[in-house]
Amino acid sequence: MKTIFITLFQGTEAKSILRTNIFSNLSSDANVRIVFFVGSPERAEYYRKEFSHPRIVYESVAGYALHGWGKFFSSLSFKLLNTETVKLRRIMTLEENKNYPAYFFNTAANIFLAKNWIRKLVRLGDYFLVRENIFSVYFEKYQPALVFLANLFDGLEISLLREAKRRSVKTVGFINSWDKLTARNIIRVLPDKLLVFNDLVKQEAIKYADMVEKDIYVIGIPSYDWHINHKPLSREEFFVKKRLDPVKKLIVYAPMGKTFSNSDWDIIDLLQTAIKSGQIQRAQLMVRFQPNDFADELELKKRSWLIYDYPGIRFSKERGVDWDMSFDDIKGLTDTLANADVFVCYASSMSIDAAIFNKPVINIDFEVKRSELMSKSPTYFYQMTHYQNAVKSGGISYPKSKEEFINQINLYLENPTLDREGRQCLVREQCWQVDGKSGKRIANIILESIKL
């Protein structure tokens, strides 16, 4: 029997692995044992209740802290990536702390250090100088054949990856979000194989992670398999379930969340007012909040008329990575997208979800209220490296004013085929294939790797 180590330290990892065909295909192989690493005994117990099996083990790893060379190389990794997203984040930090010396130092360091040959030297130093043995006991205990990691930008997972490579254990990394390679820092230690969503991310892996092309595998987006494999509720069933008016069109708005926007409730009120006043005719609004953020309960109470979904379980008291979506939550998203008539959001991967169902997508590109901080002005996120590809696809509308926003909604409600070719381009570029088999492809690569 071969043992596979898999990390589940973040909600995104659980969604991409446990709740897709990655898990079902791996766990069905009688010659495979899976050891899941989680962040606490409570999280282990939570997953064990739903995903229990004689060949599945949960190990809790907590208390990890950077120190010494590990702390040095972690800090340095943020200076080795030079993208538009990194530049924007640096400006956001400057606006918040007003530390101009740090801003100019980091800018200069970034320009000088973000080079392929320097990254390679730094990775060598990281590999040989950092001495962390937090995972050594687990390698001795289980003797794994392969390590699968879905967050290569986390120090704890890099520690696991480094230990695996020192022991000549095969490693497979998975870039589980379309913005990770261009957003913050480089991958400090490279896996043997890297799995990516699409060819755009593949090129980013070559350019920014310095991966060799032959070791990169394009597999699609496993969490989107649900959009193919789950038969959504009919329009009649969905409207009854959500208490919607069956004779009206449905506008779905996905808030960005208070961490990055000060305008979500204003947009909700703007849409509702336009509907009630007849500026948008024969339509109704439904809001779908993020699973990794919190909706303001006081604001919700002010709007007793609001129909909304609040999916997910939040394990921490603040927005972050510690959350989970149930199978019902995931199916509910597919149901919502299948029955929406227009989808509205700011910069979000949900734009791609909606485009898969050929639903007109609007990204709000005007400021509802002025903010002194760029980090609270969500329209700035359209400038980020990963989102520029979505902008260029032509599959998303970007209204520049309230009037243009309402007019665009009406145009889409009247003619939902507008910008269809652009949406097809968006899906083709970002999803590679939408065939319901991305999770299976990942599982097959893992299983084939342990047989070699």
Image (spheres, grey):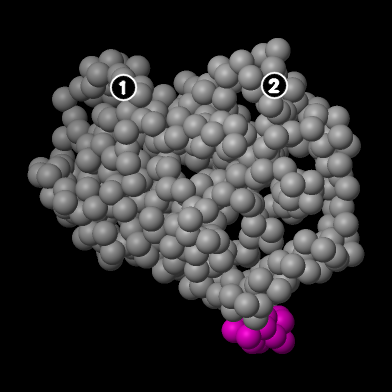
Could you tell me residue 283's position as x and y percent? 21, 36
Say whether residue 214 is visible: yes
- Mark positioned earlier in the residue sequence (1 or 2): 2
- Quarter-wise, where is residue 116 in the image? bottom right
Residue drawn at 67 percent across, 37 percent down: 146
Q: Does 8 lie within the magenta span?
A: no
Viewer-side label of 1, 2: 2
Instruction: Indicate whether residue 108 is drawn in magenta.
Output: yes
List the residue tagged with mark 2.
1
Position of the C terminus, as image quadrant, is top right
Query: Can you identify the residue that label 1 sits on?
Result: 232
* Residue 223 in view of the camera: no
Q: Nearer the viewer, residue 304 or 190?
A: 190
Instruction: Measure the alpha-carbon separation of dots 1 and 2.
Output: 38 Å
Residue at 55% x, 61% y: name it.
211
> Residue furthest toward the left?
415
For the point 35% across and 17% down, the residue is: 241
Dominant SS in magenta: helix
Amino acid marked by disc 1: Pro
Residue at 57% x, 49% y is 193
Residue closer to the observer: 127 or 414 = 127
Q: Is residue 403 left or right of residue 9?
A: left
The segment highlighted magenta reads 99-112
**Where 53 sits versus 380, above or below?**
above
